Image: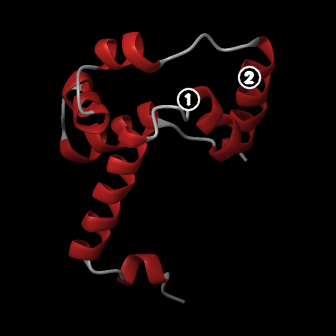
Amino acid sequence: MTDELDRLDDRAAAAAFRRLVRHLRHRTDAQNVDLMSLAGFCRNCLSDWVGEAGGLDKEVARAAIYGMPYAEWKARHQAEASPEQLQRMKDSVAKNAA
């Protein structure tokens, strides 16, 4: 059986991807550690996937996702993660291996 995702038009997929990235840029309150805890991926993961798919340097790929250099985004928006957040992230990441 063919996965419907594989049948999705590339233009539609690209538009949806760009919408996702713009949404993540807008929602700076959604911390990467929380995204990892809930979904098992975050902005860094997304930038790694983009970099791998496009043969991009890590910092170039991150800037494409964050809309600015990663160091700048971290300084502006990233809060210190609590021990509880870090544990939830660790538990979630373990599910990715399964």
- Residue 29: where, in percent of width, then height? 53, 32
83 or 2, which is in the foreground?
A: 83
The residues bearing labels 1 and 2 have C-alpha atoms spaced at a distance of 10 Å
Q: Are marks 1 and 2 in contact (CB under 8 Å)?
A: yes
Residue drawn at x 31%, y 32% is 66
Please determine whether, in this image, residue 12 is positioned above or below residue 93: below
43 or 30, which is in the foreground?
A: 30
Residue drawn at x 29%, y 29% is 62
- The residue most toward the bottom is 1
User: Disc 2 designates what residue?
Assistant: 85
Three-letter amino acid code at disc 1? Gln
- Label 1: how many residues lie within 10 Å, few (<14), some (14-19) or many (20+)? some
Residue drawn at x 43%, y 31% is 44
Per the rendering, the mark at residue 19 is none
- Residue 68: where, in percent of width, then height? 23, 25
Judging from the image, what secondary structure is the residue with disc 1 in?
loop
User: Disc 1 designates what residue?
Assistant: 31
- Residue 73: where, in percent of width, then height? 35, 20
Judging from the image, what secondary structure is the residue with disc 2 in?
helix
Please determine whether, in this image, residue 87 is positioned above or below residue 61: above
| Colour basis | secondary structure
